[in-house]
Image (cartoon, rainbow, N blue to C red):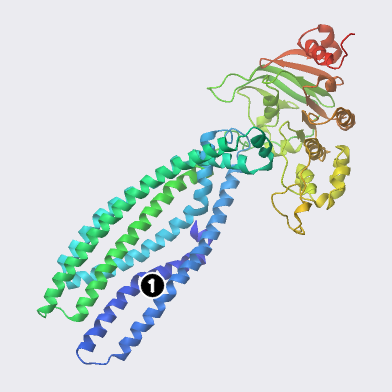
């Protein structure tokens, strides 16, 4: 991955790493010769220049390594993020995204994807440098004293085991704290966003959410603190062991030098070699531990990137043709998992081309779930849904959705300029201002957007500036709930070539006059399209061709408004119950 993302940076780091490993060994031996010749009365200027030159070269290695490491980190992070979010886009349904365990792994994958690849590459090159330095300094010790070399190597073995264990423990802590970190971010968002601030302040929830956020942060910190304490104890003990070995070797060699067995240069190179071996071992262990930790975390990245979509695009996916006959729901059963109850229980429904079908039911009856199935966010557990006789599972989901215009009950308001808030309804028309304004007019929001400080280029957010902003924070505007609903409706109306319109509570945030106006507009706009209408305000559904009443996951009643009123069933009871609210009590 590193060679693909930044080959020049990897090669530069490899060269610098080898130089950083071999250079000190060469410098130690040249220094030894320099000192021995000086003691012998010679003036070795060539050696002095060589020592100075190598010193200058080694001084340039750290900044080169730092620059190339930063460049590698940037490129690898970009490459990893591209892979991660491309993989998430392959999940055409919502099953994975609604799974909290998968969300935890996505959180860890995002963190690991930004840092782990660079850590693995940097660690590998750092290990290369450590191995080169260790080989050189160990060969030096063997030349001077094989016994001392063996003792130094033996003393390094506990450090290898201890640091690898610490690396695994820290990776386990990071993995185990993913859920708590997501909760911490959730509470932090509640405490900092304007959308949540109203209820948080009204209900006095600041201390409550802050306490929970700090509790989650405290649990994460406690786990990390335990690992840090283990690391502190380990490093102190290993440092003491290394100092004892180095000190003992120095005392022994000093006594040998006093007898003439070793020269002053030998003593100097021995000190440098022992310190070099210990530093190389410590650095190598740290690099291996960091790489192990990064690889353990990177496993979450690989899991997300390689995870197969639970609902995907078939290899021979069909291109959905323009709707001619209609959409039919055939004996559809659905539940979100084997551990959940059935949401839909054998639903049969037909949405003819050019007709409007209204879906009515109490909360939890399965209306929004049926919308998800029509959009192929989920697939039926049993039964099937067809588009002119073709199973939706055989169609390309992306192309199928292009033939739909949908207003969701929980529509999204984007922190984007007004033009883009409408234009994202069809990104192919993102820069087609006449089309965007036409959709806004139909939704009754054009006058509102045109009157903003910078018209359709006004950011509908106060969170940050956008390219081209003047920097004046007054330009950022937040719309009312009803205005946002009209923007969401304009987003759907931008798809004026759609075959299926799904309107899930499209006017719930509007006043009575605005609601009547919107439904007049929608009646004219949906002509020639298959339309699914969902609303708790039954008066807005009277002109639907067919009304389907969902109850307990089944279609309990089906017919026109007049037919269902004559049948005097659930629909008639709900309609009369709502109508009573508009009737005056008798005097």
* Residue depicted at 39% across the width and 54% down the height: 290
* Residue depicted at 62% across the width and 36% down the height: 314
Residue pointed to by mark 1: 19
Q: Could you tell whether 438 is left or right of 263 in the image?
A: right
Report if residue 432 is visible in the image.
Answer: no
x, y percent for residue 355: 84, 24
Q: Could you tell whether 397 is left or right of 87 in the image?
A: right
Residue 554 lies in what quarter of the image?
A: top right
Q: Is residue 522 above or below residue 429?
A: above
x, y percent for residue 454: 83, 53
Report if residue 296 is visible in the image.
Answer: yes
Where disc 1 sits, the SS reads helix
Q: Is residue 509 above or below residue 37?
A: above
How many marks are shown on the rendered structure?
1
Q: Is residue 246 above or below residue 51?
A: above
x, y percent for residue 537: 80, 22
x, y percent for residue 503: 78, 29
The C terminus lies in which quarter of the figure?
Answer: top right
* Residue depicted at 45% across the width and 47% down the height: 297
Q: Is residue 135 above or below residue 93?
A: below
Q: Residues within 10 Å of mark 1 (few under 14, many from 20)?
A: some
Residue 425 lies in what quarter of the image?
A: top right
């Amino acid at each position: 991955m590193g060679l693909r993302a930044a080959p020049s940076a990897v090669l530069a780091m490899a060269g610098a790493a080898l130089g950083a490993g071999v250079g000190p060994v060469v410098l130690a031996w040249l220094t030894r010769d320099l000192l021995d010749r000086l003691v012998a009365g010679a003036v070795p200027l060539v050696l002095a220049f060589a020592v100075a030159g190598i010193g200058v070269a080694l001084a340039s290695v750290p900044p080169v390594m730092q620059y190339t490491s930063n460049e590698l980190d940037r490129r690898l992070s970009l490459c990893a993020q591209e892979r991660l979010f491309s993989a998430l886009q392959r999940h055409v349904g919502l099953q994975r995204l609604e799974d909290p365990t998968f969300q935890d792994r996505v959180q860890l994958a995002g963190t690991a994807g930004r840092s782990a690849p660079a850590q693995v590459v940097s660690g590998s090159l750092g290990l290369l440098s450590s191995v080169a330095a260790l080989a050189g300094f160990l060969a030096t010790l063997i030349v001077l004293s094989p016994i001392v070399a063996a003792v130094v190597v033996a003393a390094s073995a506990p450090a290898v085991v201890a640091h690898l264990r610490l690396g695994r423990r820290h990776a386990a802590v990071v993995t185990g704290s993913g859920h708590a970190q997501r909760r911490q971010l959730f509470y932090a968002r509640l405490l900092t966003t304007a959308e949540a601030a109203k209820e948080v302040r009204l209900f006095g929830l600041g201390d409550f959410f802050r306490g929970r956020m700090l509790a989650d942060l405290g649990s994460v910190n406690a786990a990390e603190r335990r690992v840090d304490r283990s690391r502190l104890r380990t490093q102190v003990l290993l440092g003491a062991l290394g100092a004892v070995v180095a000190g003992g070797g120095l005392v022994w060699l000093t006594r040998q030098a006093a007898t003439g067995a070793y020269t002053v240069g030998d003593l100097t190179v021995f000190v440098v070699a022992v310190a070099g071996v210990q530093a190389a071992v410590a650095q190598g262990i740290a690099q291996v531990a960091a790489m192990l930790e990064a690889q353990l975390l990177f496993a979450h990245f690989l899991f997300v990137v390689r995870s197969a979509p639970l609902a995907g695009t078939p290899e021979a996916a069909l291109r959905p043709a323009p709707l001619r006959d209609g959409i039919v729901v055939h004996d559809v059963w659905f539940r979100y998992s084997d551990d959940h109850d059935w949401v839909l229980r054998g639903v049969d429904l037909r949405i003819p081309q050019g007709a409007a079908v209204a879906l009515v039911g109490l909360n939890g009856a399965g209306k929004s779930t049926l919308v998800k199935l029509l959009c192929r966010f989920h697939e039926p557990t049993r039964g099937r849904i067809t588009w002119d006789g073709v199973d939706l599972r055989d169609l390309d989901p992306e192309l199928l959705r292009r033939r739909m215009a949908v207003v969701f009950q929980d529509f999204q308001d984007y922190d984007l300029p007004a033009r883009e808030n409408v234009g994202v309804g069809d990104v192919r028309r993102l820069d087609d201002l006449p089309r965007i304004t036409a959709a806004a007019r139909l939704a009754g929001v054009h006058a509102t957007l045109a009157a903003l400080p910078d018209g359709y280029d006004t950011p509908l957010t106060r969170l940050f500036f956008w390219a081209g902003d003047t920097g004046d924070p007054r330009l950022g505007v937040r719309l009312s709930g009803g205005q946002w609903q009209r923007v969401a409706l304009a987003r759907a109306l931008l798809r004026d070539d759609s075959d299926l319109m799904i309107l899930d509570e499209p006017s719930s945030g509007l006043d009575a006059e605005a609601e009547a106006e919107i439904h007049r507009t929608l009646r004219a706009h949906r002509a020639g399209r298959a339309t699914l209408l969902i609303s708790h305000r039954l008066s807005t559904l009277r002109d639907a061709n067919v009304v389907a009443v969902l109850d307990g996951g089944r279609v309990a009643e089906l017919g026109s408004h007049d037919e269902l009123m004559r049948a005097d069933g659930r629909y008639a009871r709900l309609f009369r119950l709502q109508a009573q609210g508009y009737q005056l009590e008798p005097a």
